[in-house]
Amino acid sequence: MKNNGEVVHLTNLELRLIYYLVSRAGQTVTTEELNQRVWGYTGEADNTMLKNVVYRLRRKIETDPASPKIIQTVTGVGYKLVGE
């Protein structure tokens, strides 16, 4: 993956997360769905782990991670890829 012409190295979890979000670009994906699809969890999963992976991914691909334009948080629901 490249960001501003630079190669960005993603971990396996980051890659699985971005792949799933890309496959549903423009749609809100719930945290439960991401936990199940990325980690294989069913039921209550550790949302802190998901937030950490999203945080790391944003730092790698967003121009301004504090004001994300690509991976947006849908408060109380999950995330949405609206990217550039």
Image (spheres, rainbow, N blue to C red):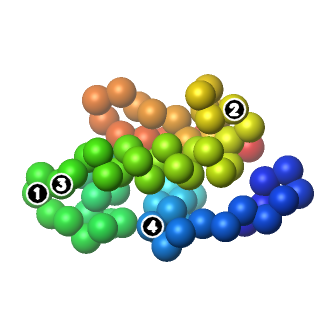
Instruction: Compare residues 55 and 39 and report the one nearer the observer.
Output: 55
Point out which mark residue 45 bears.
3
For the point 50% across and 55% down, which residue is it? 21
Residue 76 x, y percent position in the rendering? 28, 29
Of tags 4 and 1, which is closer to the observer? 4
Amino acid carrying mark 3 in the image: Ala
Point out which mark residue 13 bears.
4
Q: Quadrant of residue 18?
A: bottom right
Label pair 3/4, CB-CB below 8 angstroms? no
Residue 64 x, y percent position in the rendering? 69, 32
Q: Distance between the Cα atoms at labels 3 and 2? A: 28 Å
For the point 41% across and 31% down, which residue is it? 74
Amino acid carrying mark 4 in the image: Leu
Q: Secondary structure at mark 1?
A: loop
Q: Is residue 64 above or below residue 25?
A: above
Q: Secondary structure at mark 3?
A: loop
Q: Secondary structure at mark 2?
A: loop
Amino acid carrying mark 1 in the image: Gly
Label pair 1/3, CB-CB below 8 angstroms? yes
Q: Which residue is mark 2?
A: 64
Point out which mark residue 56 bears.
none
Q: Is residue 26 visible?
A: no
Q: Residues within 10 Å of mark 3 (few under 14, many from 20)?
A: some
Q: Is residue 59 above or below residue 42?
A: above
Label pair 3/2, CB-CB below 8 angstroms? no
Of tags 1 and 3, which is closer to the observer? 3
- Label count reads 4
